[in-house]
Image: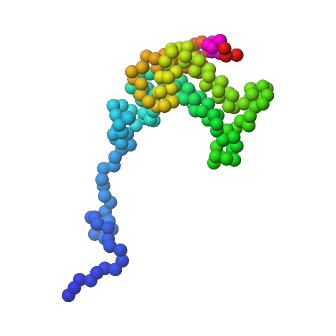
Amino acid sequence: MASKRRKGRPRKPGHRYRNGNLRPNHEPLVSPAAVAASQPHRKGLGDSAADQKAESELGRMVLRSEISALQYLAGQRYAAQWRAYLSTLDGPRSPQRGQGRGNICRGCPTASEQDKCACDLARRLWTRSTFALQAAHPQALIIVARVACWDLPSSWALPVLICGLDALAECLGLTTRNKSRPVENLNPNHV
């Protein structure tokens, strides 16, 4: 006599309990730290490979103790100023266009309105930081932009990067010393 074939969907393969229920497969789970340690840009960070700072080159430099936490904060602030300035250049003018994103500036024809303009403020803040970087070292602007904004490694120029980040920390008022120092005087043409 031929065996009868069961109706319905075939059973999933695997070990079963006596009642027919499938036993759970107890494979060892991979921890997020092990996954992070296997990523090429996080190799060599050891236990801190799963840290959130390891996502950027600036953060990895902090985790390797090449720069301080204050210099890391200065680099983050500079990158934020750079992104804010870039968003003002030829961006969409209306919040209705561009899926809700848009430049909040509608154009500032008079000087009194220009002081309150968001795009002019972003330009002035970024320009102030670039003057501070240029005053610190001739190559500091390029090296800080490579690491903080473009996320490229520059371990060969670490002294220039540290000098630039220290100048940025003072310019942005992140240090406790020299907070009242006028940073606008770094460029004699800047009024």
Residue at the outermost front position:
90
Relative vertical location of residue 25 with respect to residue 12 in this rendering, above or below: above
Tell me: 183 left or right of 107. left
**What residue is rendered at 66% in x and 14% in y?**
189
**What span is colored magenta in the figure?**
180-188
Is 189 within the magenta? no
Q: In the shown orientation, is residue 185 left or right of residue 55?
A: right
* Residue 53 visible here: no
- Which residue, as the protein is rendered here, is positioned at the far left? 1
Place residue 156 in its image quadrant. top left
Residue 81 visible to the viewer? yes
Whether 187 is among the magenta residues is yes
In the picture, the quarter occupied by the N terminus is: bottom left
Give the image quarter of residue 4: bottom left
Give the colouring mode of the picture: rainbow
Instruction: Give the residue drawn at x 32%, y 71%.
Output: 11
Residue 33 placement (x, y as % from top left): 37, 40
| x 55%, y 16%: residue | 134
Residue 14 locus on image (x, y percent): 28, 64
- State how many labels appear: 0
**Residue 40 picture location, percent across and down:** 35, 37
Of residues 40 and 24, the one nearer the viewer is: 40
Viewer-proximal residue among 168 and 9? 168
Q: Quadrant of the C terminus?
A: top right
Residue at 60% of width from left, 33% of height from top? 86
Asked whether 24 or 116 is in front, the reply is 116
